[in-house]
Image (cartoon, rainbow, N blue to C red):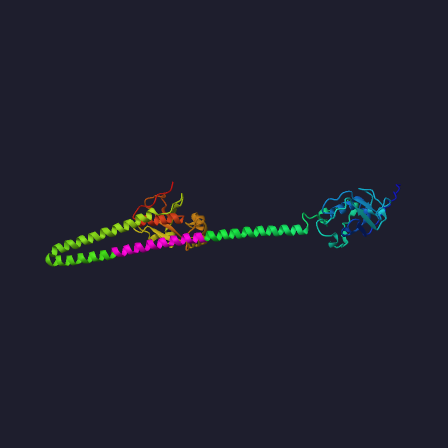
Amino acid sequence: MSKTMPKAEPPPPPPPRPDPVKLQVKCVAWKCMDFQVDARLPEYQLAHLEEIINARHGDEIQNLTLYKGPPSEATKLTPGSTDPVSSTGASCIFYDYYPPLDPFHNRPTAGEVFATNTVITLQTFENLDKPVIEPEKLTWSKTAEHDPWTARQLAAEAAEVEAKAKAEAEEAARIAAEEEAAKQAEKDARAKRAAEKKAQKLEEERIAKEEEEKRLAEKAAREKEADPEAAARAEAELAKKAAEEEAARVKAEAEAKLANLPKRSKGGVIGVFLGATSKTYFGLDACTKDNPFALVPCDKILAEIKDKGKISDMYIIQDQVKAYKGPDPKEMLFCLDKAEVYGDEGFCVCLTEEDKENFIVHIGAGNPLPPPIK
């Protein structure tokens, strides 16, 4: 018969953790650096307290010494000790450093920074984990680069330099604006004088032409009375001459427009296939040999694409339509391409405002479609 082993006694519970208490820390040299620590002191070492003190001084301090009472050889503590803070049995720890430089340097007196004796509540830790000190959260003092008077003086000088530079820049901008305005005024005046001179010349030519026409009409009337057949020939000559002059004028205007056309871009015109429904919807079925192009609003094209999606004949140029640049309302030129200059799709479309202008002028001058840009 087997014997039942007695159950092992459970381990005793861990001792309770110490309660947090406040420890007063006083700076011998500067009362404004006094502070309190609220923590479980047995869990913090004297080295941790040194780390906290060093962190509170924004500038490095040297020869830091801790005391467990008013400073003396008897109360001096070992630097960097790993002993718990509670082992000192003190409720107030003093510290000193040498040389005792002002922690708030470059100000009239340290007393201007009131001693708040702030309380620093440190983290508590389970399972006796090592405490974590975060120096960047503890910084209290920091040496300034300049004393207040010098800082104010430098700030005033910097502000004066900035104001002077700003004033000079504004003055330069004003002078430049005035010079530009004067140049523009002179340019406008020259343009106005040229326009007036041209208008005067045109008026003189009109008057001379009217007088010449009147003279010729009177002469034709006299000749008609004297010789009807000769008068008829003269009228025919006049009509022919007028037609020739009108043709020359139209040609000159077309040549002037052609000479001032904007530069086209490569790929600015492409062929596009359009079914009968699309031609009718966009009014392109009205295009003829004599009137081969039509302007279609970009908004109408995009609306049709949104409605039909990928089955729209215009879907392939959706990105170009969205990116089209031109004056509002934006319109794209579609043109018959019977000669298959841009492929065998039957139509071509101008994707830029510059190509559209070129097409309109060339077609208006009776020229064939401008060829693709290589």
Q: Quadrant of the C terminus?
A: top left
Q: Position of residue 244 (x, y in %)?
A: 23, 50
Res 289 seen here: no
Does residue 332 appear to the left or right of 104 in the view shown? left
Does residue 62 appear to the left or right of 201 in the view shown? right
Q: Position of residue 324 (x, y in %)?
A: 43, 50
Residue placed most toward the observer, 220 or 327: 220
Of helix, strand and loop, which mostly describes the magenta segment? Answer: helix
Residue placed most toward the observer, 50 or 239: 50
The number of discs equals 0
Res 278 seen here: yes
Residue placed most toward the observer, 145 or 76: 145
Q: Position of residue 53 (x, y in %)?
A: 76, 47
**Does 229 appear in magenta?**
no
**Does 192 appear in magenta?**
yes
Residue placed most toward the observer, 91 or 265: 91
Q: Which region of the structure is painted magenta?
A: 178-205
Q: Quadrant of the N terminus?
A: top right
Q: Position of residue 235 (x, y in %)?
A: 17, 55
